[in-house]
Image: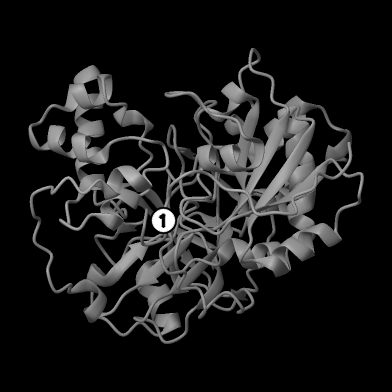
């Protein structure tokens, strides 16, 4: 199959154009962060069933060692991110507030922290789909774009929905974040290797790496690694938010519409993040597990913004010390990007597999002049920008009346992926996304 031509930048209808805010980090090479004295490794760093601990308190572990196994298909294992001693297995705080069980490891001072554990691996390019899928699960890989959905499940669509195209999301349309951009530049070969393995795992015919047109250096770096007749191609898409969302990327690059309530595999597609593919391409040939990831630390509240390779479980408090945090508490912190990220409840929250960035704001950004919520004026801005064609205004009014079931049954609430476009343009400062999240939670409780 020949290389597809993407001479013009493709896109999807609607969306917004928030300021990029990437100048402080997009040109900074990835640097390794120091190892924290202690790491906190939650057993649930993925969507699905928590891992099952396989270590005991006071046990010595080495970097890369398997410390928790997958609890069934909807789970992934966990590996030690440092060499040290297990200090405890107890409930620890999470970014969203509720505590969850975690393995705490005290790092051995002076150790080289070299990876000392791996599984024997043959040539995976000659392996069966089943063997590659198992290797992906063994590595503990999840989606690194934020959702943390187990990668082995995503690459195993239902048998009745054959996949012809693997889409790789290299858009990184969230403000501040430049993690994926740097990975495409610095870990290009790992990314390409990961995509080739993922094509085999999903049984796809081709792959397209979608990159926004404000990253010409990444587009050039990727295309330089691909032959003209390669089954992998690079698609140039317009820089717009939320271009990197699965449904939006499918619409832009393939012109296919994922049906309401449907998944990408319903239209023959699987979507993965470039960071996930680079980890896959690096870890699987070595037989190693995921123990660290690249994150962007940016914002006016840090003195040394950049892209850092961070051991999983590193507490935010330690990370912030390394980058020159000028604040005193967690009120200025957002895990992920400012559009879809979450504020944190404590500086003791650790970096987990799904954390792509840390945005650190300062007092002016967190103290808006007018944060009062006003009545909807029916301006229609939210309708104009909603990427999936919903009516956020009507949904917000139903939420205010607690008509949560009606929101789902007649107004397609579950098609909302909480991108935040509606709240971003709302002149009345209505927290629409928060309303929608509450409605979804209450609907799930009602149906359980």
Residue 293 sits above or below residue 12 on the image: below
391 relative to 317, above or below:
above
Instruction: Tell me the quarter of the picture where residue 369 sits.
Output: bottom left
Q: Where in the figure is residue 351, as x and y percent of width and height?
A: 44, 60
Residue furthest front as drawn: 379
At mark 1, the secondary structure is: loop
Quarter location, residue 18: bottom left
The residue at which mark 1 appears reads as 16
**Whether residue 314 is visible:** no
Residue lying at the far top in this picture: please name it: 160
- Identity of the residue drawn at 31% across and 42% down: 383
Residue at 49% from the left image edge and 46% from the top image edge: 55
Q: Closest to the observer: 68 or 443? A: 443
Residue 385: percent from left, percent from top: 37, 48
* Vertical position of residue 47 compared to residue 103: above or below: above
Quadrant, the C terminus: top left
Characterize the local packing of mark 1: few (<14), some (14-19) or many (20 or more) Cα atoms within 10 angstroms. some
The quarter in which the N terminus is drawn is top right
Q: Position of residue 42 (x, y in %)?
A: 41, 49
Q: Image check: 164 left or right of 67? A: right
Q: Position of residue 178 (x, y in %)?
A: 55, 67
Taking depth in this image into account, of 435 and 259 the one nearest to the observer is 259
Looking at the image, which is closer to me, 426 or 140?
A: 426
Q: Nearer the viewer, residue 308 or 26?
A: 26
Q: Is residue 320 left or right of residue 160?
A: left
Position of residue 215 in the picture relative to residue 315 (left or right) = right
């Amino acid at each position: 199959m020949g290389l597809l031509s993407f001479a013009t930048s493709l896109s999807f209808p609607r969306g917004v154009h928030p300021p990029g805010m990437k100048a402080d980090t997009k040109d900074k090479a990835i640097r390794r962060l120091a190892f924290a004295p202690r790491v906190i490794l939650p057993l649930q760093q993925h969507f699905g069933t928590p891992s099952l601990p396989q270590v005991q308190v006071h046990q010595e572990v080495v970097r890369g060692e398997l410390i928790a196994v997958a609890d069934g298909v909807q789970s992934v294992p966990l590996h030690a991110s440092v060499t040290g001693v297990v200090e405890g297995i107890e409930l620890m705080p999470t970014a969203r507030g509720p505590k969850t069980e975690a393995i705490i490891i005290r790092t051995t001072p002076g150790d080289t922290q070299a990876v000392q554990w791996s599984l024997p691996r043959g040539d995976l390019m000659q392996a069966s789909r089943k063997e590659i899928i198992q290797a992906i699960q063994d590595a503990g890989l999840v989606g690194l774009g934020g959702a943390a959905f187990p990668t082995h499940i995503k690459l195993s669509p239902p048998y009745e929905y054959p996949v012809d195209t693997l889409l790789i999301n290299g858009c990184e349309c969230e403000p501040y974040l430049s993690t994926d951009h740097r990975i495409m530049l610095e870990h290009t070969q790992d990314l390409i290797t990961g995509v080739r393995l993922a094509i085999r795992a999903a049984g796809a015919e081709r792959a397209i790496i979608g990159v926004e047109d404000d990253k010409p250096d990444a587009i050039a770096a990727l295309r330089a690694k691909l032959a003209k007749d390669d089954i992998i191609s690079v698609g140039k898409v317009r820089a717009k938010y939320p271009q990197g969302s699965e449904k939006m990327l499918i619409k832009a690059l393939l012109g296919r519409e994922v049906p309401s309530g449907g998944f990408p595999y319903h239209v023959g597609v699987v979507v993965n993040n470039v960071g996930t593919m680079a980890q896959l391409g690096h870890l699987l040939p070595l037989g190693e597990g995921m123990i660290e990831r690249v994150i962007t630390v940016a914002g006016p509240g840090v003195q040394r913004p950049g892209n850092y390779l961070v051991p999983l479980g590193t507490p935010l408090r330690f990370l912030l010390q390394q980058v020159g945090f000028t604040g005193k508490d967690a009120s200025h912190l957002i895990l992920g990007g400012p559009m879809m990220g979450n504020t944190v409840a404590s500086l003791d929250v650790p970096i987990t597999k799904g954390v792509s960035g840390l945005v650190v704001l300062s007092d002016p950004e967190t103290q808006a002049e007018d944060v009062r919520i006003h009545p909807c004026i029916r301006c229609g801005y939210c309708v104009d920008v909603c990427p999936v064609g919903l009516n956020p205004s009507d949904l917000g009014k139903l939420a205010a009346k607690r008509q949560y079931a009606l929101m789902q049954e007649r107004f397609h609430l579950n098609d909302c992926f909480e991108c935040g476009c509606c709240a971003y343009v709302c002149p009345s400062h209505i927290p629409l996304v928060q309303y929608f999240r509450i409605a979804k939670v209450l609907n799930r409780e009602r149906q359980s």
